[in-house]
Amino acid sequence: MTETSERVVIAGGGPTGLLLAGELALAGVQAVVLDKREGIEEFSAGMAIHSRSLDLLRLRGLADRIAPEEIFAWPRTPFGFLWLDLTEVDEREYTHAYPQWRAERLLEQWVTELGVEVRRGSEVTGFTQDASGVSVEVLGADGTYRIEGRYLVGCDGPDSTVRRIAGIPFPGGGKSYYGVLADVELTGGDHDLFESGLHETGVFGALPLRPGMTRLMTIEFDTEPDPDAGAVTTEELLASVRRVRGREVEIATTHFSYRYGGRTRLAERYRDGNVFLAGEAAHQLFISGTQGLNTGLHDAFNLGWKLAATLRGWAPPALLDTYEAERRPVGERVARHSRAQMSLMHPLAEMTPLRDMLTELTRHGSVNQHLMEATAAFGYPPEGTVPAGDPVEGEPHPLTGQPVRDVALSTAAGDSSVGALLRGGRGVLVDLTDGAATGAWPEGWADRVDTVTARPAPEIGAAAVLIRPDGHIAWADGGSDGKGLEHALRTWFGEPAAPATGKE
C-alpha cells in the first residue's frame, strides 16, 4: 500500500517531532508523525527545560497549560561538575525541573487538537527521494507500507535512521563516555540516598525525585556503550555503580532505565534535498542539563514555519536554506560547550586545578550568566539574519536575530502581549509609536503578516519590529522611518500578494 499526499512526514514523536508537527498544522500544512514507540511512558531521561524553551511554548499558549505543581525553577544547574547559581543570573536563563515525558504529553495533546495524525508503533525503515518529494517505507503493526510527502524530517534521535539513509556524516569529538540512568526504589540503608560525587573512574549520582523514588546516574569515561546491547538490566546498572562508586546500592524495584554515551556529535549538514534533520538526529550532546531537548525544540520552531511557507507557496527561494544557516552554528556552539562539560567531569587529576579555578569564577554573577547563555545558545547573530543587500546603511539594529521578549502591549484592540500576537504562528509587524510613525507601512503581506499598532514598550527597545513566526526579530527600527522594512518583508515573507506600497 502507498499513501500519497502533499505533506510533511516526521520520523520521531518526541518533543522535537511533535512541536514541528504542531507548527506545521498551525500554518495549515498537513503532517504525519511516525513513532516506533507504542506510547509515552511516565519516565524519561530528560528532567529539565530552559526558560527560553518555555518562552517558545508560551508563544503558542502552551506554557499556560502547565500546572504549577508540575514545574519549578531549580536554584542551581550543572555545568560539567560545577554548579551555577541561578539566583545570580537573569531569570530568563533559569532551568526548570520539568520531565521530558510531561513535555511530550503536553505537545501530543496540542497536536491532536490541531488534527495531526500521530502513528504509534510505526518505524521508518527506508526512503527514497527525487525532485518532487519523498517516498518513505514504514513498518507498522500490520506490516510494511509506503507513505509519500514533499518533505521528510528526521527527529528520530542520535541513532537516526533518516540521517543514516541520507548518508549525512555524524562525526564526534571530545571525550567518550558510557553511563546508565535509572529511576529506582531503594531499600535498606540506601532508601533515602542523596549523593553526587566525582570518583577515580567516573561520576555517580543519586537524586531523590519524590518519596520512594530515586534517580541513579553513572558516567564512565574513555569507553562507549555497546551498540548491540539489549535493554538495560539491573545487573548492568549495579555493575556500573560498583565500578564508579566502589560499592553497589540496594535496589528493590527498577521503574525506568536508560543507557547513554558515546561522544558529542554534530551532523555535517542538516539538509539533504527534501530531507531535514532536527533535534538529536542532528546533534548528540552530553546528557547534563537536557541540552538535547532544549536545542531540539528550537530546531523545530525554526524549521516549522519555513517548511509551511514553502508548501503554502509564498516562501522566498532561499528560505529553507536559512534553517541550516541559523541552526547548525547553534549546534556547533552547544556541542563545543557540551565537550567542555564532559572534560570538566573527567576524573583525570590534571583537570582538578581547572575545576577549582572555574569554581572560583562561578562565584561571580557575570560568569554564571555567560555560561548559561553560552550553553543554551539562543538567538542568531545579526549578520546571519540581515537580508543580503539590505539597503539600510550602517550596522543592523542590535535586536535583529534575537528572540523577542514577551511583554505586555496596549493596542487599539485592547490589552495584549507579544506572545498573544504570535499565538497563531504568523509573522507580526508591531508599530510601537502608537501610530506616530511617518508614512504608511508596506502593504501586500496581510495574508501572512499581521500589522499591529501599540503604545511604546520600552522593554522591547525599538520603535517598530518585524517578528518572524518563530519569535525572532527579522527587522527593527530605532526611529520611526521604517527604512529597510520592505526588503526584510520580501526576504523573510516573499513577494507581496499585491504591489507593495509604503516605506522602502
Image (cartoon, helix red, strand yellow):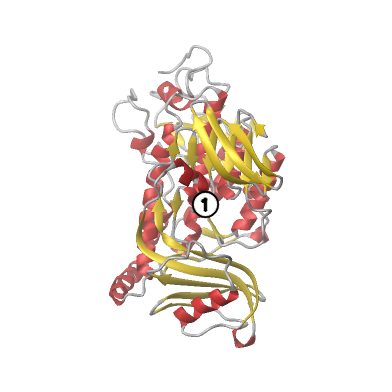
Quadrant of the rendering where the N terminus is positioned: top right
State the SS at label 1. Answer: loop
State the residue at coordinates (51%, 17%).
443
In the rendered view, does 302 fall on the left or right side of 143? left
Q: Tell me, yes or no, if residue 5 can be seen here.
A: yes
Quadrant of the rendering where the C terminus is positioned: top left
418 up-or-down from 42: above or below: above
- Hey, what amino acid is under mark 1? Gly
Residue 149 percent coordinates (x, y): 58, 31
State the residue at coordinates (63%, 50%).
36
Residue 420 percent coordinates (x, y): 61, 38
Residue 356 percent coordinates (x, y): 32, 73
- List the single residue furthest toward the top: 499
199 up-or-down from 472: above or below: below
Disc 1 crowd rating (10 Å Cα; few below 14, some 14-19, many 20+) is many
Quarter of the view holding residue 422: top right
67 up-or-down from 152: above or below: below
State the residue at coordinates (56%, 65%).
230
Q: Tell me, yes or no, if residue 469 can be seen here.
A: no
Residue 81 percent coordinates (x, y): 41, 70
Quarter of the view holding residue 111: top right
State the residue at coordinates (61%, 45%).
18
In the picture of the structure, the residue carrying the numbered disc 1 is 157
- List the single residue furthest toward the bottom: 189
In the rendered view, does 108 fall on the left or right side of 417? right
